[in-house]
Image (cartoon, rainbow, N blue to C red):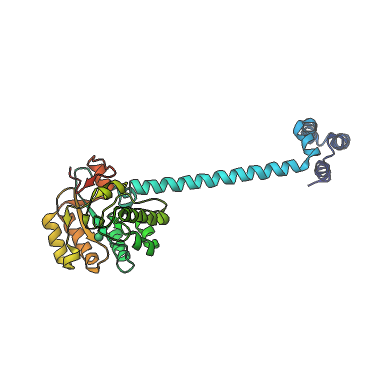
Amino acid sequence: MNMLDKLFSREINRRTGAHAISIYIDSNTKTRKRSRSAGAKALNATKITTKHSQGSFFHRLDVRFPWLKLIATVVVCIIAILDLANFTISKVTETDDKIRIAPMSHHVKATERTLEGKKLVALTFDDGPSAATTPRLLDILTEKDLPATFFMLGSTARANPDIVRRIENDHHEIASHTMYHQNLVTIPADAARADINEAKTAITEILGHGPAYTRPPYGNLNDTVITSVGTPIILWSVDSEDWRSKDPNSIISVTMSEVYDGAIILMHDIYPTSVDAIPALVDTLRGAGYEFATISELARARNIPLNPGSIYYNLTP
Ligand code: NI
């Protein structure tokens, strides 16, 4: 930086306006007219610009209220940060919705996700989550690359919130099996309603949204239950009887003897033997031409609308 440039910068910094710059330019013109004519032209241009800005509204504003610029900068920064945060939040929300509505879109490779023309079943797991068994089941489902629907108890969900979040993050579907697994048709209506609502609250507190479906314990229904759930009621058409046999071979043979396209298969993620059965059961079902879907996917693939308070045992084509 030569001396003239330094002078120029200093004068600009002092904000004394065009007068000082004119002095500088005049001296430059006199002393370096021949050798630096191009530079002088540029400086003249600067002079014009500076004069213009000195007279401008914003320049006068800046001189009188120098703090205004600071405040304006802070306001713009805050707006920018808020805007960015809002963008991020809405993006996350959008992803959450996608996960809830179309869990499989992330779950399985696109080439394997053509449900059209396939025989479909929905694997459903009741009574969990359990810290002892559900994580291992989730590992297997991830490894086998298939989605399931979990009808969880509000009480066990509340005891295992991290597992509930993992179930959703693994793109499975979240449904309610009520709060305490009471037989809702044998308790007072108020107690049944309270149990249903408490489960919804427990799940909502963990995930920020309620269960997509409800399956009352033992599949027992009455008018109170039907009018209280506020979601479609999903029962089952194939009982693997895992709760009775507690034997992987039996679970597979019972399921394969009853399964059909559109079946909803009942299992429980609280028994180690049920988890043990899953790898071979999945392979056997795939070998028989079946593919796996959540309840929502199965309903969508079959164009079956799922209505709150309506009861579904299967979702056949
Ligand atoms: Ni149950």
Q: Percent from the top left, x then y, of residue 169?
A: 37, 55
Q: Nearer the viewer, residue 94 or 44?
A: 94
Q: Nearer the viewer, residue 19 or 182?
A: 182
Asked whether the viewer can see residue 113, the reply is no
- Give the residue at x 29% y 51%: 214
In the image, residue 178 sits, relative to residue 54, either above or below, namely below
Q: Nearer the viewer, residue 282 or 122?
A: 122
Classify residue 310 as left or right of residue 3.
Answer: left
Q: Percent from the top left, x then y, of residue 24?
A: 86, 38
In the image, residue 183 sits, relative to residue 247, either above or below, namely above
Q: Percent from the top left, x then y, of residue 7?
A: 84, 43
Q: Quadrant of residue 76?
A: top right
Q: Percent from the top left, x then y, of residue 159?
A: 38, 64
Classify residue 282 as left or right of residue 22.
Answer: left
- Give the residue at x 17% y 60%: 240
- Give the residue at x 82% y 44%: 10
- Please tell me in which quarter of the rendered image ligand 1 is found: bottom left
In the image, residue 154 sits, relative to residue 303, either above or below, namely below
Q: Quadrant of residue 161?
A: bottom left
Asked whether the viewer can see residue 304, the reply is yes
- Give the residue at x 85% y 39%: 16
